[in-house]
Amino acid sequence: MGSFFKKCACGRPARCPHNYTVRYRDLSGRQREESGYATQQTARDRLVHLYTTKCNAPAALLEERRRLARMTFAEYAEYWRTRQRHLVDYSTGRKHRSHLTAHLYPELGEHRMESISPMITERFITGMERRNIQPGTQRNVYGLLRAVLLDAVRKGAIATDPTLGIKTRDYLPPRSIIPTVEYATAAARTADFQLGLMITMMRGCGLRNGEARAVNVNNVISDDVYRVTCQIHHNTYRPAPLKHRRPGEFRDVPLPRSVKEAIERFEQRHGTTDEGYLLRGPNGYFTYRIESTRAAKLHTVLPPPDGMTLSGYRDLFASVCLEHGIPITDVSEWLGHRKIETTYRAYRHVMPGSLARARQALDHTLAT
């Protein structure tokens, strides 16, 4: 059934204050140890519980757990990926594949699941730090590793969580470089006519790059609302579901009058596709490759602030809304963030007015 003992060197272990350790074989047949039992009785009770669980487990379940435990990490990770039906976003699936093949498989791919321990996980994290992997990539790779290992724990392939007690470095994304309104206006006027409309949609409605590439006259559902329904994906160059959304889901965003007029002017001068898309390329859609080429030409003529990317125009939309007192919950929804913490972390620095208003309110209230 198992055994219990103390690892201390005390002369009279039955009376010393150290905790007991239990040793047993898990459902996969591998020897395990657990410590932290204050008395002999609690150690015995734990062994009895483990033995009863083992005896009552169906033979088919035991065999399945043994099979999963003998899998390599690469085999189990592929088995895990086939069950992630909720990952409808194309980018997420591609990033998982990239992190697995570039970082996880070379280091852990041949390890059997039953052999992975906190020490091996810690060694992997240390290796990423030693190779100077970018902090954001380290966070994403470890998040993927942890998801696979916790799934293995739930399935019984691993007896104890290999991530217990492991601390990773805190990651703070770099602060967004936000252009001025004057620069954004000049960029929209100076850019190629298609890139100019894309910039207008990003700074006026807060669209992501791919969403702005998919600007569509049919999405203007009223004089002041634009419905974001899809994006032109940067890898497939085809319409795809929105980030963090399932096919058919959408979000409504404010439509400034100037942006609506820009859409109408573009339609009158250049027309649309049969599907209503305004921006077009040689293969039908305005793709990431076209966007990046024309953005490079624009920034040669009109140099942007140091460190600014094209998504800075979307950041301008968020900063203008927040600086004018729009609730961050609304802004987060318009931006399409999955969690409001993402919005707060990215744009907290453009909300200094809230602190000043709070101080003034408190001064007024407490002085009365």
Image (tube, grey):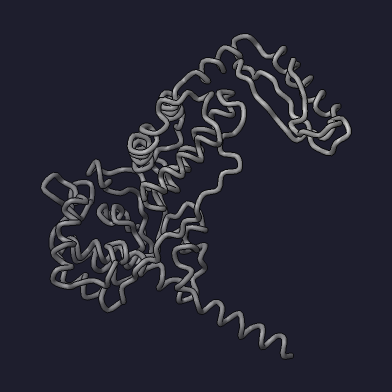
Q: Is residue 52 left or right of residue 349?
A: right
The outermost residue toward the right is 15
Q: Residue 308: image x %, image y %?
A: 29, 67
Q: Is residue 4 left or right of residue 258?
A: right
On the rendered image, what quadrant is the N terminus found in? top right
Kindly identify the residue that appears in the image at 47 percent across and 51 percent down: 338
Front residue (pair 34, 295) = 34
29 relative to 159, above or below: above
Q: Residue 358: image x %, image y %?
A: 61, 79
122 relative to 193, above or below: above
Front residue (pair 12, 19) = 12
Kindly identify the residue that appears in the image at 21 percent across and 70 percent down: 188
The outermost residue toward the left is 282
247 relative to 352, above or below: above
Q: Residue 106's image quarter?
A: top left
Kindly identify the residue that appears in the image at 45 percent across and 55 percent down: 337
Q: Is residue 115 left or right of residue 231?
A: right
Q: Residue 242: image x %, image y %?
A: 37, 47
The outermost residue toward the front is 11
141 relative to 350, above or below: above
Kindly identify the residue that appears in the image at 55 percent across and 23 percent down: 157
On the rendered image, what quadrant is the C terminus found in? bottom right
Q: Residue 34: image x %, image y %?
A: 70, 30
The outermost residue toward the bottom is 368
Front residue (pair 254, 366) = 366
Front residue (pair 216, 17) = 17
Number of marks in the rendered image: 0
